[in-house]
Image (spheres, grey):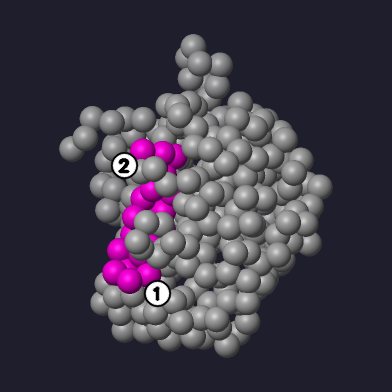
Amino acid sequence: MTDDTRPVWVLGGGGVAGIAWEVGILTGLADEGVTVTPEATLIGTSSGAVVGAQLTSGTPLAELFERQRRGVAHETSPALGLLHLLRLARAQLFARSPEQAARRLGRLALAARIDDPSRQRRTAEARLPNHAWADDVDLRVVVVDTGTGASRTITRHDDVPLVDAVAASCAMPISAAPVSIGDRRYMDGGMRSTLNLDLAPGNGPVIALAPSTAAIGPWARIDKQRAALGTGRRVELLLRDPASRRAQGTNVMDRSVVPALVAAAREQGRREAAPGGRHACGDNAGTGSARLTPRPSRAVV
């Protein structure tokens, strides 16, 4: 058992809409005094990797919110059609492990003909206000090896450009080309799990933002991943509320919904953090910020 009791923020995947929702939620929490403290560990998967990199860029959260509220013209990734979704689903049938499922998905990713393979990196560059890893923040980006199916968590110590790590974590098979890092090719970290809650290190409190609860297999279900962290660990899970779901609609890659969604998510964040809301917030003495300290509610898992 590790003695690392630092808080962990787990930022899940959910497309263009997931970025907007997470930025909005975090802004609403900050409005009520709940912020990501400097000592926290951040684990980002897919759109959560984008948000994690944005948070650690030195850009004020209010500016990140405004970037979303003004619209995201740089988002050009197409939504997957029904046929492509069925191909992804079929590749996962009867898989006995996350690695086996990911290897099948990796074969699809490697075989796909992508008209503009460089689009993935350009989009990552446009999403990030700073292209360098922060020296003083523990940001971890989840990617999946297309060949072995194994997940990898990339940090600032791995000598991998931040843009490449984020681009790889968002490289959805069939829609985007895998990203080469060293002699390996990597795809979306969501091909292991859209949240990757069980990768939270240490034994400190965990706050997880989950714009999507989709599970590739039984191992990716949130309840299974929560169980892997142990019963004695405090974990709080934030999901989209009805207003955020209405603002998002059904297409997570639809950039037109971003201004309304980020505003709805900000209001949700305020409600979650406000006194008497579903989630309680406690001040961090002497830091000038706050840490989420869950009280019993249906979102504490």
Which amino acid type is marked by label 2?
Pro
45 sits to left or right of 258: left
Q: Which residue extends farthest left?
A: 1
Q: Which mark is residue 213?
A: none
* Rendered location of residue 258, percent (x, y): 74, 55
* Range shown magenta: 139-157
* Rendered location of residue 4, percent (x, y): 28, 31
Q: Is residue 134 visible?
A: yes
Q: Disc 1 marks which residue?
A: 106
Helix, strand, or loop for circle 2?
loop
* Rendered location of residue 154, percent (x, y): 38, 48
* Rendered location of residue 58, percent (x, y): 60, 30
Label 2–label 1 contact, CB within 8 A:
no
Which amino acid type is marked by label 1?
Gly
In this rendering, the label closer to the viewer, 2 or 1: 1
Q: Disc 2 marks which residue?
A: 201
215 sits to left or right of 248: left
Q: Residue at x 47, y 62 (%)?
A: 179
